[in-house]
Structure formats: C-alpha cells, structure tokens
C-alpha cells in the first residue's frame, strides 16, 4: 500500500451564524455554515406558510365556481328528467 494516501482525520468544529457550535471529526478543522438545526425555522417550529402570489386564494375561488356550476348543472338535469 502507498504511504500517506488518505487525508488526516482530525477533530473539527462546525460553527453556525447563530453562534451554535457542533464538535465532530472531519478532514477540515473548521467549517462555517449559515443555518443549523438550532436556528432553522422548520426545526424550531416557527415555519410560516407564505403565499405571495395568492395561489391558494385563486384555487379556492376556482373550486367554489366549479362547485356552483356543478350544482346548477345537477338542478337543470333533474328538472329535465321530471
């Protein structure tokens, strides 16, 4: 086998922008990240649903129109069959 083939595996620290520091082992001594599990909205429970384009409202309006049109069509078909 070749000598000195693998990189050195040392203790390292991962530092987040929020100040959280995680100790682990890696080939790098320090790593800087922008977001971690301590400050990410999904993990902290502060996640918000943002509907900037109004897509949900548009869908609800289309659904209401479709239901109304079906009811009118059902009433017309019942009147014709009588």
Image (cartoon, rainbow, N blue to C red):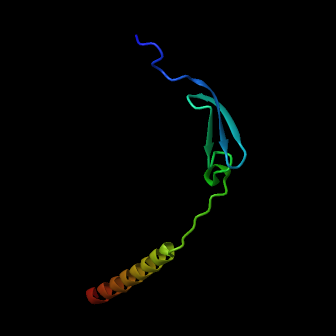
Q: Nearer the viewer, residue 51 or 12?
A: 12
Q: Residue furthest right?
A: 19
Q: Nearer the viewer, residue 45 or 77?
A: 45
Where the N terminus falls, by quadrant?
top left
* Lateral position of residue 3 relative to residue 23, left or right: left
Q: Residue furthest left?
A: 81
Q: Position of residue 25 (x, y in %)?
A: 60, 27
Q: Position of residue 67 (x, y in %)?
A: 41, 79
Where the C terminus falls, by quadrant?
bottom left
- Above or below 19: residue 69: below
* Residue at the (47%, 20%) spot, across then down: 6
* Lateral position of residue 5 relative to residue 8, left or right: left
- Above or below 4: residue 78: below
Quadrant for residue 8, please give it. top right
Q: Nearer the viewer, residue 81 or 34?
A: 34
Q: Position of residue 80 (x, y in %)?
A: 27, 89
How many marks are shown on the rendered structure? 0
* Lateral position of residue 33 relative to residue 20, left or right: left
Quadrant for residue 68, please give it. bottom left
Q: Residue furthest top?
A: 1
* Lateral position of residue 52 relative to residue 39, left or right: left
* Residue at the (50%, 72%) spot, across then down: 56
- Above or below 9: residue 78: below
Q: Nearer the viewer, residue 63 or 46?
A: 46
Q: Position of residue 4 (x, y in %)?
A: 48, 16
* Residue at the (48%, 73%) spot, across then down: 55
């Amino acid at each position: 086998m070749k000598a000195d083939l693998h990189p050195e595996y040392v203790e390292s620290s991962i530092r987040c922008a929020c100040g959280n520091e995680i100790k682990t082992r890696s080939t790098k001594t320090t790593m800087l990240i922008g977001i971690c599990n301590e400050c990410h909205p999904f993990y902290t429970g502060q996640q918000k649903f943002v509907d900037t384009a109004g897509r949900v409202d548009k869908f609800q309006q289309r659904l209401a129109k479709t239901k109304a049109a079906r009811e009118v069509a059902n009433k017309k078909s019942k009147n014709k069959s009588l």
